Amino acid sequence: MKPRFSATRRVGNGTIVILVLAWSLHETGVGITSLIDGRAGALRMLKGVASPDMSGEFLGIVGSAIVETLHISLAALVFAVVLGVPLALLIAGNVGAPAFIRQGAVVAAATLRGVPELLLALVFVATVGLGPAAGVYAIGLHGAGLLAKLLSEQLEAVPRGPVTAIRAMGAPRYVIAGFGIIPQASSDIVSLILYQWECNIRTATIVGFVGGGGVGQLLDIALKLFRYDELATLVLAVLAIILAVDMFSRALRQRVGATVSSVQ
Amino acid sequence: MWELRGVWLTHPLATSYTLQNVKLRIDNGEQVVVLGSSGAGKSTLLRCLAGDLAPTHGTLSRNSIDVYASDTARKGYLNNVAMIRQTGDLVPRLTARSNLLVAVASQWRLTDLAQIVLRRSTRFDADVLALAKTHGVSHLMASPVERLSGGERQRIALLQALLRQPQLILADEPTTGLDPATATAALEALRAVTDVTLVVATHDLTVAATFPRMVAIKNGLVVHDGAPLTSHDLAELYAADLLE
């Protein structure tokens, strides 16, 4: 078989790729020197992290922030479900929504999930102000786009027989969706919604960095003021809540007998 | 009277004609069996009669009116036809009652449907219970269909069809997957329905032999239409195609 590119061209292309990579490494300043230069900061951080702030007063503040983070994740989940489920139904081919509405839903969902949560959070901080509401809107809208895509794929994957049978009875679309498609995909729908909640918890800890409320705001303050003992406590609290939600969600998903055991 | 005139039909998943120049006339109240091996075109013929697959060429008419003359004509036709597919077509995770509700959902307004689902209206349940009692399945109404036996699911599928009060019932392989006793009971229940025209597709010679009219189909062509063929004739017609 004739090679696709000549040897000279292959060497040329390889050189360009290597140059671009080397340029990126140089411009970003990564390398062993930067790590050695940062050793003092790393030691300071390690010293602080080794002795987390476990004072009652600070633990109380962390507890409130964790509760607020949970609130953000759940409120955002409500938004994501209310927006995402109808979009998924419009996108799923077996529901049979009119082509122009389906296309509109596809574009809307792609747009929502295409804009990163942090960018959305910045937009909402600028519009509704600092606080958890901005985080809820940002995470909820992004989650709606994600849920719409993942749920529509689950809806389309249900066995076709019952759906075809209902359609042949002359049933309207809402009957086909409500009685033929959703019941068959119900456990996977629950599973995906729970998975979205897990994602929301992780994101809710980050949006605080840009003013979206929750434990992220405390993390931001601790980092900026070099309070590493407080940072350690906060990181431990975040890990604990993420693990707890993961375990709770996994147990629930197993209970509903979902076939989607994990979604990446 | 239902009539297929010179029907050629290409199945959506096929590249060649699944039905070839089919001419068939079925009178009101007739009980017809369509016999053929797997892939012969039985299901396609039934779906064509059900108004689910439109003929590529030729016409399907009911009392000399073309079913595809207008959307209204087709909708009216669909409301008078019920198809019993293989039992896997019931919706899993729904109860037998909900599966029956699905069959008549298009006849209710959305608000009425919501009332029925929330059990705030007894109109639907009264009809269903009466019919279920006649067929001995009233105790199954609250059971999810995946927990029912093959015979019980077949009964629910029959009730789905009857609830729609159709003029024509089309049953596609209604005894597949059932043990002989259950299959006989299911078939008897189906044939006991009066005032309805019945067309049953099967590859089971024993089932086919009990019908007064047999339409034999091979490679999409109707090769026999009339009184049931003898085993000898069928053996000649299909060689080893049909399952005994």
Image (cartoon, coloured by chain):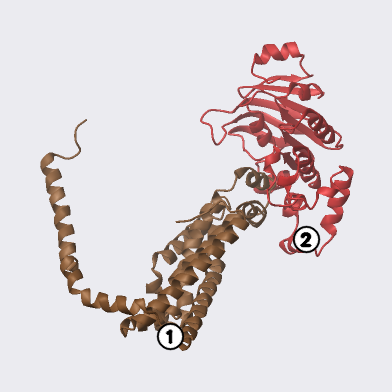
Chain colours: A brown, B red
Marks 2/1: CA–CA distance: 46 Å
> Which amino acid type is shown beneath numbered disc 1?
Gly
Residue A174, image x, y percentages? 64, 57
- Residue B224 lies in what quarter of the image? top right
| Foreground of the two, A151 or A127 | A151
Q: Residues within 10 Å of mark 2 (few under 14, many from 20)?
A: some
Which mark, residue A129?
1
Q: Residues within 10 Å of mark 1 (few under 14, many from 20)?
A: some
Looking at the image, residue B164 lies above or below residue A117: above
Label 1 residue SS: loop
**Residue drawn at the location 75% of the way across and 57% of the way down:** B108
- Residue A26 lies in what quarter of the image? bottom left
Residue A40, image x, y percentages? 22, 77
Label 2 sits on residue: B116
> Which amino acid type is shown beneath numbered disc 2?
Ile
Residue A208, image x, y percentages? 41, 79
- Which quadrant is the N terminus of chain A positioned in? top left
| Extreme residue in the left direction | A8
On the rendered structure, is A216 left or right of B26? left
Label 2 residue SS: helix
